[in-house]
Image (tube, grey):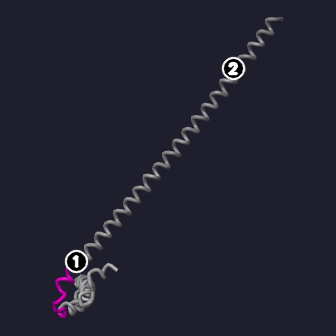
Amino acid sequence: MQYVTVDASLKVRKEKELKHIKEKAEKEAKRAEREKAEQKKRSKKHQEEVEREQKRRERQQAELKRQASIQKQANFMQHFLRGKKGGNMESLGNHHSMRSPHPNVFSKIEDSSATSAMDCTLSEENQLRSDEIWK
């Protein structure tokens, strides 16, 4: 009779150990799953940060390029104003109204005409100073 109780007791103990091992394995699996999810989340966040930084750099480069273009145009205008301050602007004033019968040539002339018209307007103003261009 004692052997039966010892057998039953060992059986219960083994079942408890198995249950404990199973629970431990499930907890470990859940922990590993959480870690994997956290790592994925960190990776995604890092990738988004990298993309934001890249876009910021691209915007900054575009802004610097735009500013350089404006500076170049302003320097050109300033040089133009210095060179033409005392000269006669009549010949340039008539250039911007020139027309061409050919459509391809017309668009090129029209583009340069707009620039010439702006340059003429700026240079015709005797009171216009180069520092006023920046305002």
Circle 1 residue = 76
Measuring 34% from the left and 62% from the top, which residue is drawn there? 61
Query: Counting other residues with Cα less than 10 Å from the Cα at mark 2, is it few (<14), some (14-19), or many (20 or more)?
Result: few
The C terminus lies in quadrant: bottom left
Residue 111 place in picture, x, y as percent: 26, 82
Q: Which mark is residue 46?
A: none
Q: Is residue 84 above or below residue 6?
A: below
Q: Is residue 90 above or below residue 35?
A: below
Q: Which residues are magenta?
A: 75-90
- Tell me how far mark 2 sits from mark 1, CA to CA: 88 Å
| Magenta residue check for 83 | yes
> Disc 2 vs disc 1: Cβ atoms closer than 8 Å?
no
- Is 33 in front, or is 73? 73
- Is 86 in front, or is 19? 86
Q: Which mark is residue 17?
A: 2
Left or right, residue 108 beside residue 57: left
